[in-house]
Amino acid sequence: AEAGGIEALVALATNGADGGQHKAARALRNLAHDNDANRVAIVKALLALVAKGAVGGITPLVELVRSGDADGRKAAVGALEKLADADADATTRTVIAQQLVGLLSSNKVDCKEAAARALTNLAWHNAANKVTIAEAGAIDPLVALLSSDAAGDREEAAAAHEARWALLNLADENAANRAAIAT
């Protein structure tokens, strides 16, 4: 972080070629893993791009999930998960949850699966994230993904599997979420 690598990786994830974008997103994910200082530095670097007129916040990572190659999508979702870790501030968690919920409506099944998996992990034993994810509107699209399991398609079944886990984690020790899922 001290050498300026985070800023360069954020710029590459934002403006690089497809191959460079996914590698930069993977590097950001790894730097954010269990490292509060790096998570803060990554968010600051993303916000600095916004101040310079670049596309806002975590949007470059979300766009990589939507339009990158399979490796780029996987790395970008991983980076989003790490940035929304338990120690992230409420605003960061909310924005990431909203973006992940948006990905649940993607026309790419692997995006839906990755978003549901990320929401599963964010909700795991984290009361604040459970509330944030529910408030971002995740429950209805996750329930809708459950019906895709009946289609018999392997990718759809994988997305439905992740949706089941996400709903399980959202419902765990959260009566309001259990009620919302049941209705």
Image (cartoon, rainbow, N blue to C red):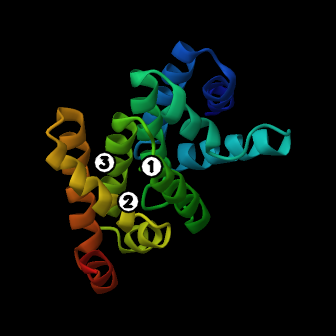
Q: Which mark is residue 141?
A: 2
Q: Earlier in the sequence, mark 2 or mark 1?
A: 1
How many circles with numbers are drawn on the protein?
Answer: 3
Rendered-image quadrant of the C terminus:
bottom left
> How far across and how far down the image is residue 9, in percent?
61, 26
Residue at image mark 3: 117
Cα gap from disc 2 to disc 1, whole angstroms: 7 Å
In the picture, which quadrant includes the N terminus?
top right
Camera-side residue of 126 and 144? 144
Q: Along the line of sight, which residue is nearer the eye, 91 or 152?
A: 152
Residue furthest to the front: 151
- Crowd tier of the residue under label 3, counting other residues whose Cα lies within 10 Å: few below 14, some 14–19, many 20 or above: many
Q: Amino acid at mark 1?
A: Ser
Q: Does any portion of residue 97 appear in the rendered image?
A: yes
Alpha-carbon span between mark 3 and mark 2: 13 Å
Image coordinates of residue 139 in percent, x first then y, are 36, 67
Q: Which residue is mark 1?
A: 105
Q: Residue at x 41, y 63 (%)?
A: 138
Which of discs 1 and 3 lies nearer the camera? The answer is 1
Q: Residue drawn at (62%, 32%), measured in percent from left and top?
A: 6
Please tell me which of labels 3 and 2 falls first in the chain.
3
**Would you say 58 lies left or right of 78 here?**
right
